Image: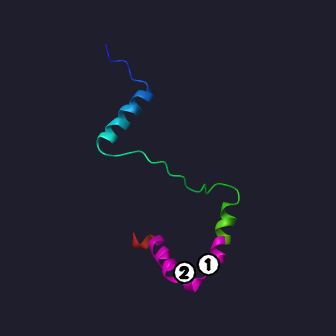
């Protein structure tokens, strides 16, 4: 007779214990919700406020990192 499957919560707890035993810890990261109303407008506004001369090096880096040909 096959063993009874463990509840999902028990499996997750065992998984977390294994990760902690490997020296890892859980971290919660909050990021902007790009689907939120007004997100695109807020980003556009922030971009327009950038001083191109002061930000040139950073913007060049971002453009290079975003270029799919470089991947």
Q: Residue 22 colored magenta?
A: no
Point out the residue furthest to the left here: 22
> On the rendered image, what quadrant is the C terminus found in?
bottom left
Secondary element under disc 1, as helix, strand or loop, is loop
- Please tell me whether the stretch drawn in magenta is mainly helix, strand or loop: helix
Q: Quadrant of residue 36?
A: bottom right
Q: Position of residue 39 (x, y in %)?
A: 66, 61
Q: Are marks 1 and 2 in contact (CB under 8 Å)?
A: yes
The answer to whether 63 appears left or right of 36 in the picture is left
Q: Residue 66 colored magenta?
A: yes
Per the rendering, the mark at residue 55 is 2
**Could you tell me how far apart the alpha carbons at marks 1 and 2 are, in whole angstroms?**
7 Å
Residue positioned 69% across, 66% down in the render? 41
* Residue closest to the eye, 57 or 65: 57
Residue positioned 56% across, 86% down in the render? 53
Magenta region, residue range = 46-67
Q: Which residue is mark 1?
A: 50
Up-down: is 40 above or below 4? below
Q: Position of residue 20 (x, y in %)?
A: 33, 41
The answer to whether 40 appears left or right of 17 in the picture is right
Residue positioned 42% across, 45% down in the render? 26
* Of callouts 1 and 2, the N-terminal one: 1
Residue positioned 65% across, 77% down in the render? 49
Q: Position of residue 12 (x, y in %)?
A: 41, 33
């Amino acid at each position: 007779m096959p063993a009874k499957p463990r509840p999902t919560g028990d499996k997750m707890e065992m998984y977390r214990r294994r990760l902690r035993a490997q020296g890892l810890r859980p971290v919660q990261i909050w990021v902007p919700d790009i689907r939120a109303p007004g997100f695109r407008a807020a980003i556009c506004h922030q971009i327009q406020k950038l001083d191109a001369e002061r930000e040139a090096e950073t913007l060049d880096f971002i453009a290079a990192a975003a270029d799919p040909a470089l991947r």
